[in-house]
Image: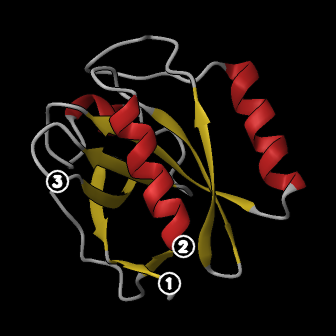
Amino acid sequence: MSVPLSEKAVVFSPSVWRALIEHCRSSMPEEACGLLGMAGGVVCGIYPAENIRHSRVTYEISAAEQLRLRQAIASAGQQLWGIYHSHPGGTAWPSAVDVAQAYYPELHYIIVSCGRGEPVVAVFRIVAGRVSPQVVSLAPG
């Protein structure tokens, strides 16, 4: 079951958008993962992480790396905004496992489908098992 779309678009800097797609492509066939930072209303920081599961169908970031990345985000003057991962062979929609493991309702979840043709990037809020797709745009430049 989905809830209505957000009225305000999520804005990505073009460089973060490109780096996000590149990280996901370069991690194939495993799922890529990492964190995203925001400042001034724009997703402007990408913090790639190691998928300690080294899996094609699931991901996990170690607790130590999560802490290190959170500190890097804060040091850059950003706030932790989202968690991203890729679906190397699947769609840009949260799987049942993704929904069950959406432990941070205050964050956004980004999925990059990059195994079939052009990559598709989708942003979601997942709260209490409800998936809400978000509108996405790129900042000028």
Q: Which residue is mark 2?
A: 13
Tell me residue 124's x, y (percent).
35, 59
Q: Which amino acid type is shown beneath numbered disc 2?
A: Ser
Q: Residue furthest right?
A: 75
Which residue matches tag 1? 139
In this view, 22 is above or below 52: below
Marks 2 and 3, how far apart at CA: 19 Å
Q: Gap in Å between the C-alphas at discs 1 and 2?
A: 5 Å
Sooner in the amino-acid sequence: mark 3 or mark 1: 3
Q: Indicate the position of residue 123 as horizontal and vertical percent values.
A: 35, 61
Residue at horizontal 54%, vertical 45%?
Answer: 104
Q: Is residue 70 above or below residue 54?
A: below
Pick whichever of labels 1 and 2 is earlier in the sequence. 2
What residue appears at the point 14 percent right and 44 percent down from the top-left corner?
Answer: 91
Residue that mark 3 sits on: 118
Q: Are marks 1 and 2 in contact (CB under 8 Å)?
A: yes
In the image, 89: left or right of 107?
left
Q: Check disc 2: other Cα within 10 Å, few if <14, some if 14-19, many if 20+.
A: some
Give the percent coordinates (x, y) of residue 101. Answer: 41, 31
Q: Classify mark 3: residues with Cα within 10 Å, few (<14), some (14-19) or many (20+).
A: few
Amino acid carrying mark 1 in the image: Ala
Secondary structure type for disc 3: loop
State which mark lies toward you, 3 or 1.
Answer: 3
Query: Do the residues under discs 3 and 1 have CB atoms within 8 angstroms?
Result: no
Residue at (43% x, 79% y) in the render = 138
> In front here: 100 or 41?
41
| Real-space CA distance between mark 3 and mark 1, rounded to the nearest whole angstrom | 20 Å
Q: Residue furthest left?
A: 116
| In this rendering, position of residue 80 left or right of residue 123 | right
Rendered image quadrant of residue 50? top right
